[in-house]
Amino acid sequence: MHIANIFTEIKSIIFDYFKNLSSAEQVSMLCIVVAAFIFIILERLFPYNKDQRILREGFFDDLALYTIAQSYILGILVFSFIIKTIDESTGLSRLELFLNIPVWIQLVIFTISHDIYIYFMHRWQHRNKYLWRIHEAHHSPKKVDWLSGSRSHALEILINQTIEFMPIVLLGAPVEVLAYKGLISAVWGMYIHANLNVHTGNLQKIINGPEMHRLHHTTGKGRNRNFATKLAVWDWLFDTAYFPSDKATEYGLKTYFPPHYFKQTLFAFRTFKKLNSNK
């Protein structure tokens, strides 16, 4: 009976949370959940690495702590504290500069501009020892799938999501833009990490996908190449593309990385005395 009450309470919390979202946020949330199930099915039908299990090592940490708990807490920090404080001190959102621009045009603008930022930020993280510390968690999964991309240090998410969503809020865009931009980032993130054996041909030179991004998560040459997230064109333009015909097999870090969320979060603040230069 006690366990039943716990599940009832959890169900009530989820329902209340969902009920308080805007219609655009509700649609985005449902789409993300549906997309997750679709990727799980597709990975079973068309796997790239056929030996991978759904409940692989670190699955529950990635789902319960990184994807759900961390995302929820950081969402409050980003929107209710950081962006809200900046907006209240500047008053920019009250100008509603982007209010009357069609939502789809805003999504194109913010998706491309943020993608350019992520490309160069990502490159910098692989070259700067301090930024690498908050990025290495993302490279730690030994199996890459639709969920593994959610494993990112809290500080990395805090920085990137503030920069991703702050312009949208300050320019006075409607809530639909925030919701759908978050949807694009979430689903695309699942796609590029998915264990899918897809072949998009020349399209891979424009649209990024698991074909190139899985190489970025290997322990081989590709780990310091293929920095693009949504648009692979940045890698081809700036000579960081790596797309050999060899099959990607070994993923993760070359150095030790602790198991479980809390140890992984604290591990970023360890001393540099014995830092291995190989990333």
Image (spheres, grey):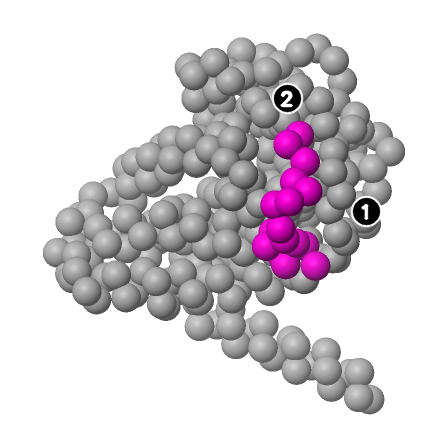
Relative image position of residue 89 (x, y in whole percent): 19, 65
- Up the image or down, 4 lies above or below 223; here it is below
Q: Which residue range is magenta in the image?
A: 263-279
Residue 197 location (% of width, % of height): 72, 24
Camera-side mark, 1 or 2:
2
Amino acid, disc 2: Gly
Depth order, front residue of 161/185: 161
Crowdedness of circle 2 by 10 Å Cα count: few (<14), some, many (20+)? many
Residue 222: assigned label: 2
Which comes before the other along the chain, label 1 or label 2? Answer: 1
Question: Looking at the image, can residue 59 be seen?
Answer: no
Q: Is residue 247 magenta?
A: no
Residue 59: x percent and y percent?
75, 52
Q: Residue at x 36, y 47 (%)?
A: 163
Q: Residue at x 36, y 67 (%)?
A: 81
Classified by dominant secondary structure, the portion drawn in magenta counts as loop
| Residue 264 on the magenta span | yes
**Amino acid type shown at disc 1:** Arg
Q: Tell me the quarter of the image containing the N terminus.
A: bottom right
Q: Quadrant of residue 265?
A: bottom right
State the quadrant of the C terminus: top right
Between residues 1 and 116, which one lies in front from this camera angle? 116
Res. 56 mark: 1
**Does dot 2 land on a helix, a strand or a loop?**
helix
Residue 170, picture quadrant:
bottom left
Residue located 43% across and 50% down the image? 159
Drawn side of residue 37 relative to residue 50, left or right:
left
